[in-house]
Image (tube, rainbow, N blue to C red):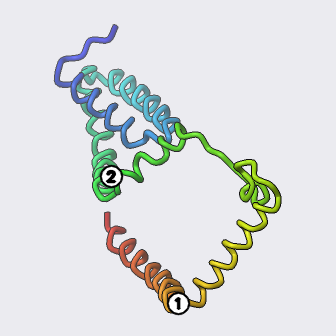
Amino acid sequence: MLEFDSLANSILTASVVATVLVHLDKLESVLPLAGIWFVVNTTLQKFGVAESSATLICAGVLGLKIVPMLFKRIVTIAATFPLALAFKYVTQIIPKYTINETDFWSCDGCSDDVAKRRKDALLTLSEKWKQKYKKCLDFSSELKKKDVGCTVHLREMFSMF
């Protein structure tokens, strides 16, 4: 078992934890970092550097690489709506159902006549609302165009991070 002094051990542990947190979505990129640490640590020991000093040097270099990435990750998480963070995990738990259009109208086991009347009634209502709320439809299509401009502006603003 390798012996580390407490400072070197705590810095190495903090660096490894930070690396795993930053690269959680691409964990396979952490393994080459561990290999590089081993090679550098072994090389420094061959040149007479103490093991704890070599570990501190490796952890410091790793820490310098991790600090900007960790800052970006923290800012992104702070600016993200909590539901967006949990959504990719919640979708794995909630059951998903798909239904085609023909089964939609008769999903409760009604007759074909009732299903046809339901479909016709909803299409008629849709056409009435398109005429009645025409200004709302026009406004919503314009709003979608303006929202893209806002998104581009926010992306430029946060690109400095």
Amino acid type of the residue that numbered disc 1 sits on in the rendered structure: Asp
Identify the residue at image location x=41%, y=25%. 38
Quarter of the image that includes the N terminus = top left
**Quadrant of residue 15 within the rendered picture:** top left
**Quadrant of residue 34 within the rendered picture:** top left
Q: Position of residue 110 (x, y in %)?
A: 75, 52
Estimate how packed mark 1 is, as few (under 14), some (14 to 19) or many (20 or more) residues with alpha carbons within 10 Å: few
Whichever of callouts 1 and 2 sits on the residue coming sooner in the sequence is 2
Residue assigned mark 1: 138
Residue assigned mark 2: 77
Identify the residue at image location x=44%, y=85%. 146
Q: Position of residue 17 (x, y in %)?
A: 32, 32
Establish if 122 lies above or below 10. Answer: below
Amino acid type of the residue that numbered disc 2 sits on in the rendered structure: Ile
Q: In the visual, does 48 lie left or right of 84?
A: left
**Quadrant of residue 127 within the rendered picture:** bottom right
Identify the residue at image location x=33%, y=22%. 45
Q: In the visual, does 121 lie left or right of 25?
A: right
Q: In the visual, does 124 lie left or right of 47?
A: right
